[in-house]
Image (cartoon, rainbow, N blue to C red):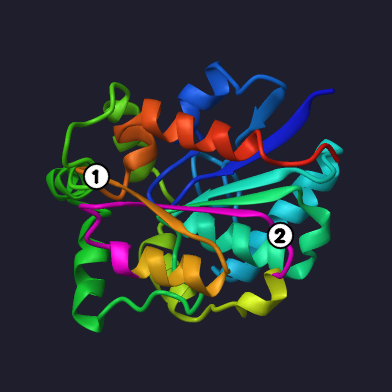
Amino acid sequence: MTRTLVALHGNFASSRWWVDLLAAPPAGWRVLAPDLPGFAGTPHSGPVSIRAYADWVQDWLGGQGVTRPVLLGHSLGGAVALEVAARGPQALAGLVLAASAPLSGLVTPEEHYPVLELLRTTPALMEASLGALFPSGRPANFADLLTDGASMAATHYSGNARALADWQVEAGRLAGLQTLVLGGELDALITPDLVRAQAAALGTAATVLPGRGHGFPQEDPVAFRALLEGFLDTLPAS
């Protein structure tokens, strides 16, 4: 029986962040990776919010006929996965949070918003910002990731930061859901302390990859896959 893992990308990103998983899914699993609204050409309308993204994901899952998937979310995608999970944890087989936004949301200082807007029109700044996510080495498809980051909807540069600041979820709403919490030692955005606090709130342990940054699933795909497959192997058949 083939089971489904749904991978949700983060900000300035797309489904191409999951090319390794899509090309070689874990044994017994299929991997689906949608492009969220406003990313990589997926149409977006209405407010920019984590709740709106979660609405879209739930509609998309229904359209794909997917039931009881494992949700994998990176960064902003982690917030979306958490929001979906909190609405009905029994509808999921498991949850994987990779450098996920904290349960209490993520506040961007006001002085950083002009820089976010500059990313829209300054390719060198976009490259430097994206490159900083991979301190031990850029992934082989970095050029593709850079293209997708630069093609994000104009509303999303400040909009996604505001959305993360305006969102939060209560850990108690995720009770009983098996969850894997991962982070990168060199991640300056979702720091190891934030990762460990998130894991503690969810009643589990955190794994922090040494020498890796915010983009550790792409920076060190071998280590990430080993952790992911080890978690998937613990999940009971649904």
Q: Residues within 10 Å of mark 2 (few under 14, many from 20)?
A: some
Q: Mark 2 is on which residue type? A: Leu
Whether the residues at callouts 1 and 2 have beta carbons within 8 Å, the answer is: no
Left or right: 185 in relation to 164: left
Indicate whether 220 appears above or below 155: above
Where is mark 2, residue-wise? Answer: 177
Q: CA distance from mark 1 to mark 2?
A: 27 Å
x 17%, y 36%: residue: 136
Residue 106 is situated, as x and y percent measured from the top left of the image, at 39, 74
Left or right: 123 in relation to 41: left
Q: Which mark is residue 61?
A: none
The secondary structure type at the circle numbered 2 is: loop
Indicate whether 138 appears above or below 133: above
Along the line of sight, the residue nearer the viewer: 147 or 184: 184
Res 16 visible: no
Look at the image and give the residue range highlighted in magenta: 175-193
Left or right: 116 in relation to 6: left
Res 186 visible: yes
Residue 167 is situated, as x and y percent measured from the top left of the image, at 53, 78
The secondary structure type at the circle numbered 1 is: loop
Q: Is residue 191 magenta?
A: yes
Where is mark 1, residue-wise? Answer: 210
Along the line of sight, the residue nearer the viewer: 77 or 86: 86
Name the quarter where the N terminus is drawn.
top right
Q: Mark 1 is on which residue type? A: Pro
Along the line of sight, the residue nearer the viewer: 70 or 62: 70
x 40%, y 58%: residue: 154
